[in-house]
Amino acid sequence: MAANTLSILKPSVNNLTARIFVRAAGLDFDDVLFRSKKGTPEFLQKDPADLTPLLEEAGLAKGSLWESCAIMQYLCNRHGLTEFYPEDPAERAMIDSAMFYLIGTLYPLVARATYPALGFAQYAGEVGSSEADESLKAQAQRDAEAALAGPLDVYNVFFLAGRSFIGGDRPSIADIRLAATLEFLRAIDYAFPPWAKEYMSQIESTLGDAYSEPAADVRGYIEYVKSQAEEAVPTPS
């Protein structure tokens, strides 16, 4: 029996991030699938946002914590994992900035570009969740995919800028969050620039099974969705 539990849903970028991190950090965790309990009064009492991953620990101010970046930051601080989240204020600020930029700028574009292909619900206020016709929704998805190149390049020219990883010589929590996010772009066969392909390969080879094992769930789901889409296309008679 593991010392801690992490309530998760598969597949999900946010959940994948936390799953990779606890494995890479060597923390004693069990993944607990929570699909059937989300939205219940019991779950909402400890997680009124109804979000996963969810970390529960007695040391937390309210006993629980969601948001993958916050979970990683907390666990690094709790266990002194400075190899993933350095103590130096300037280095830590760069990691925080990379994560905030991802959450605020890159990930919304990833969601708009990939969620329709994955069958995930779109966020309220998005074209994909509106009563717009299918052609307009498809155009919004294409526009989001086209817009990904700019924010992605920011990681290459600024956050990486000659480094192997945002964290320097080894992956940081910002690298784990970025790599997990890029996994979802496989759903639309996104044409990764060469630097991004190399970056993702280095992340996986450095973290090994800690990355490959949970990433396999996301990749498997993406392949399943693609196969279902192919079967739904009518063949000429």
Image (cartoon, rainbow, N blue to C red):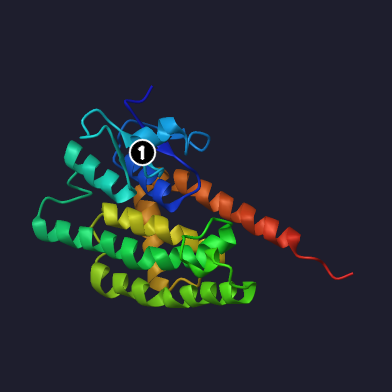
Q: Position of residue 76 (x, y in %)?
A: 21, 43
Residue 24: quadrant of the picture: top left
Q: Residues within 10 Å of mark 1 (few under 14, many from 20)?
A: many
State left or right for residue 133 relative to residue 109. right
Q: Is residue 101 above or below residue 157?
A: above
Residue at left offset 24%, top offset 72%: 158
Q: Quadrant of the N terminus?
A: top left
Q: Is residue 80 left or right of residue 185?
A: left
Residue 13 falls left or right of residue 160: right
Q: From the image, which quarter does the C terminus lie in?
A: bottom right
**For residue 203, side relative to residue 122 (left or right):** left
Count numbered badges in the picture: 1
Residue 15 position, x and y percent, is: 41, 46
Q: In the displayed structure, would residue 66 be above or below residue 197?
A: above
Q: In this view of the protein, can residue 164 be seen by the observer?
A: no
Name the residue at the right extreme.
Answer: 237
Q: Residue at x 50, y 44 (%)?
A: 10
Residue 228: percent from left, percent from top: 69, 56
- Tell me where residue 218 appears, x and y as whole percent: 51, 50
Which residue is rendered at x = 34% and y = 51% of the image? 206
Amino acid found under the numbered disc labelled 1: Asp
Q: Relative to 176, say whether 18 is above or below.
A: above
Label 1 residue SS:
loop
- Considering every residue shown, the one lying at the far top of the view is 1
> In this figure, which residue is indicated by the disc labeled 1?
47
